[in-house]
Image: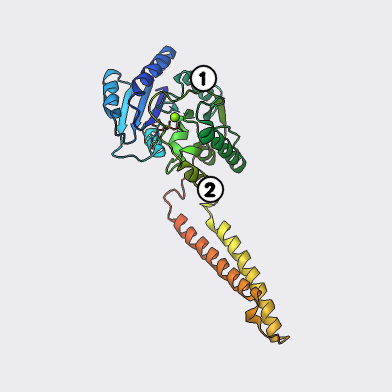
């Protein structure tokens, strides 16, 4: 199969028929063998009935329905699991992403050798203050922190080589940072393509203000996990030892002052408390690192390496 199109959706009944017929028009004109995987993330409207209807008319449409709303990451993850195509393309269900981009994205993967291509909504049609500006800031931070030079990490329209979607695990709210997960899994050629973007035609946005809190927290997790999850002691242990030594020096100095130079009132000096505090913090960090080591020793993927080639 040439192409799998994975569409996560939540309450998008009005958009689906238009989306399906548009995709079908584009993909069939190219002569691709394809599947459209619609993952209904616990919709409360008539989305599932529409999907059943579309699947009965077009054998290339598959539907998966979650029992409740698990989030866009979960929907993508399930879609990736089901995808069979040589190239996997994800797009939002709300008609903001244009199916006309599919052939171009497909070719960047198959002919130009990209592992992953992210859409870039260069001219974006979303509210400026609540979406466009914060998004500029996030993308800038993500670029700086991850070293991946993309303008639009969270674009719903993306294309992947088959092996990429089978090698990464998208969970929590990680759909914002899939390029980071791909890079971390060892896929190097990550590119971007300027894509058309439209205003939402039907329905409303599913991401409210809570994304201002979750977005940055998830970026921190992504960075922390990618840097230290396999060796937490290198982070916690190093800081722990540093704090401990610092506190130890302070207390040693105070002890000498008392024992050798017979200074009085050591326990009333702020430095005394500061020394104790740093020793406690140091020990805490060290123990945290040790516990984290034990946890990562038991992680199911502790020895899962991705083999690229064999001879
Ligand atoms: N979506 C989903 N589960 C959720 C939230 C959103 O599957 O919990 C889908 C939604 O139906 C849409 C896509 O994710 O297809 C992007 O959502 P939306 O268009 O609301 O985000 P925005 O474009 O406003 O950032
Ligand atoms: Mg949208």
Q: Residue at x 50, y 62 (%)?
A: 288
Position of residue 119 measured from the top left corner of the image (x, y, whole percent): 52, 27
Q: Position of residue 263 (x, y in %)?
A: 70, 85
Image location of residue 134, percent across then percent down: 55, 37
Q: Quadrant of ligand 1?
A: top left
Q: Is mark 2 within 8 Å of ligand 1?
A: no
Residue displayed at 44% across by 48% down: 301
Disc 1: which residue: 104
Cβ atoms at labels 2 and 1 below 8 Å apart: no
Instruction: Choose between 32 and 212: the one closer to the eye.
Output: 212
Spot occupied by residue 35 in the image (x, y as percentages of width and height): 36, 23
The mark lying in front, picked from 2 and 1, is 2
Quadrant assignment for the N terminus: top left
| Residue bearing the label numbered 2 | 220
Q: Secondary structure at mark 1?
A: helix
Q: Does residue 311 appear anywhere in the picture?
A: no
User: Between marks 2 and 1, how big is the CA–CA gap?
Assistant: 33 Å
Q: Earlier in the sequence, mark 2 or mark 1?
A: 1
**Would you say the beta carbon of the disc 1 residue lies within 8 angstroms of ligand 2?**
no
* Residue 228, above or below 174: below
Mark 2 secondary-structure assignment: helix
């Amino acid at each position: 199969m040439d192409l799998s199109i994975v569409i996560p959706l939540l309450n998008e009944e009005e958009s689906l028929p238009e989306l399906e017929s548009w995709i079908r028009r584009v993909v069939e004109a190219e002569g691709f063998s394809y599947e459209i995987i619609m993952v209904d993330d616990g919709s409360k409207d008539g989305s599932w009935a529409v999907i059943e209807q579309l699947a009965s008319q077009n054998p290339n449409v598959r539907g998966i329905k979650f029992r409740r709303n698990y989030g866009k990451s979960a929907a993508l993850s399930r879609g990736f699991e089901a995808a069979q195509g040589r190239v996997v393309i994800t797009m939002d269900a709300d008609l903001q992403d244009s199916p006309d981009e599919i052939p171009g994205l497909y070719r960047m993967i198959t002919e130009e050798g990209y592992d992953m291509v992210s859409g870039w909504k260069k001219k974006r049609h979303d509210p400026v203050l609540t979406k466009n500006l914060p998004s500029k800031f996030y993308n800038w931070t993500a670029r700086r922190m991850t070293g991946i030079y993309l303008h639009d990490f969270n674009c719903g329209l993306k294309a992947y080589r088959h092996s990429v979607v089978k090698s990464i695990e998208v969970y929590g709210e990680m759909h914002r940072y899939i390029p980071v997960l791909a890079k971390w899994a060892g896929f190097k050629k990550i590119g971007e393509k300027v894509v058309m973007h439209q205003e939402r035609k039907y329905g409303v946005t599913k991401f409210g203000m809570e994304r201002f809190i979750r977005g940055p927290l998830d970026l921190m997790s992504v960075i922390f996990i990618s840097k230290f999850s396999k060796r937490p002691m290198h982070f916690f242990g190093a800081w722990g030892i540093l704090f401990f030594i610092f506190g130890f020096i302070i207390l040693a100095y105070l002890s000498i002052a008392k024992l050798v130079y017979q200074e009085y009132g050591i326990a009333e000096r702020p430095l005394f408390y500061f020394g104790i505090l740093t020793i406690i913090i140091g020990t805490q960090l060290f123990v945290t690192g040790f516990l984290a080591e034990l946890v990562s020793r038991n992680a199911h993927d502790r020895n899962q390496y991705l083999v690229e080639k064999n001879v």
